[in-house]
């Protein structure tokens, strides 16, 4: 196992109204899209890809107070789970195929500092609690720039508002998918690595009612068919410490 690198925080964020939609996907289809140093991280031989819409608030540097107009954005990302070839990672890691955001500044900073594939998008996020106690989350995104554009996503998911949130049990698929505290990216042709820290997610399951997974197709991932089983989770808000980026050792 590789030693865990020292953590140096550079940003604060709060992630709100998180919805995770996962599908099983052919590992070979993912591997073709990854840097050669990485391979899909599998659960019982299976690979997964996720569409994750949420709100980001409280965005600020650890050295500065919040800057008006820059402290919040909507985001939707497409992610999978990876490891370095032949290495037992100290922290389970994520690879982002794309991250859509409505904040132009967030797109430019994340692309420049982290090498992450952020895209400027037109976005909406709606919340509703119906009379029967059903909680509805609807998130929509349309990519504006840079290329490839346009690309679109839509997620409408339902949750029982009285259902309790709970931490995922270690060793379960839910824990494998949700509890991820590191990311890989490429910057100037080199593999990079960064960690985040927050309390364990508290989640509950839901039902997918409507989806447009066009962002998966734009990333070169086969889009799930109508009969594909989706795993849907809602997470309570978390306050997040964002670490500095470093070269992947």
Image (tube, rainbow, N blue to C red):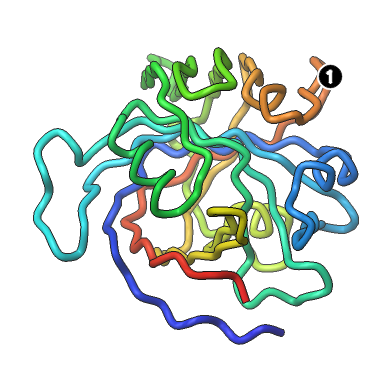
Q: Nearer the viewer, residue 116 or 190?
A: 190
Give percent across and percent down for residue 240: 35, 58
> Is 35 on the left or on the right of 105, as rendered?
right
Q: Residue at x 57, y 38 (%)?
A: 20
Q: Which residue is mark 1?
A: 227
Give percent across and percent down for residue 226: 80, 15
Q: Quadrant of residue 216?
A: top right
Q: The C terminus lies in which quarter of the figure? A: bottom right
Q: Quadrant of residue 199?
A: bottom left
> Is 156 on the left or on the right of 144, as rendered?
right
Q: Residue at x 48, y 24 (%)?
A: 146
Give percent across and percent down for residue 2: 67, 83
- Near mark 1 (Cα within 10 A), the count class, few <14, some 14-19 or many ≥20, is few
Q: Secondary structure at mark 1?
A: loop
Q: Residue at x 83, y 47 (%)?
A: 31
Asked if one can make out residue 76 in the rendered structure from this viewpoint, the answer is yes
Asked if one can make out residue 129 in the rendered structure from this viewpoint, the answer is no
Give percent across and percent down for residue 105: 28, 36
């Amino acid at each position: 196992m590789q030693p865990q690198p020292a953590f140096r925080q550079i940003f604060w964020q709060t992630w709100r109204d998180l919805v995770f939609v996962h599908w099983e996907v052919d590992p070979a289809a993912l591997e073709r899209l990854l840097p050669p140093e990485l391979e899909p991280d599998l659960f019982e031989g299976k690979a997964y890809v996720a569409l994750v819409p949420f709100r980001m608030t409280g965005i600020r540097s650890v050295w500065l107070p919040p800057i008006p107009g820059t402290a919040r954005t909507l985001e939707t990302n497409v992610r999978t789970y990876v490891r370095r070839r032949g290495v037992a990672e100290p922290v389970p890691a994520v690879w982002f195929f794309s991250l859509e955001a409505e904040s132009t500044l967030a797109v430019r900073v994340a692309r420049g500092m982290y090498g992450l594939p952020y895209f400027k998008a037109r976005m909406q996020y709606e919340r509703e609690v119906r009379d029967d106690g059903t909680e509805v989350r609807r998130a929509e995104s349309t990519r504006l720039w840079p290329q490839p554009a346009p690309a679109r996503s839509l997620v409408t998911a339902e949750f029982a508002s009285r259902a309790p949130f709970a931490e995922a049990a270690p060793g379960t698929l839910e824990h494998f998918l949700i509890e991820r505290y590191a990311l890989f990216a490429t910057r100037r042709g080199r593999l990079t690595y960064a960690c985040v820290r927050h309390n364990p997610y508290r989640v509950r399951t839901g039902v997918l009612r409507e989806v447009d997974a066009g962002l998966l197709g734009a990333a070169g991932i086969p889009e799930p068919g109508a009969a594909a089983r989706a795993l849907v989770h809602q997470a309570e808000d978390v306050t997040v410490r964002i670490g500095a980026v470093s070269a992947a050792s």
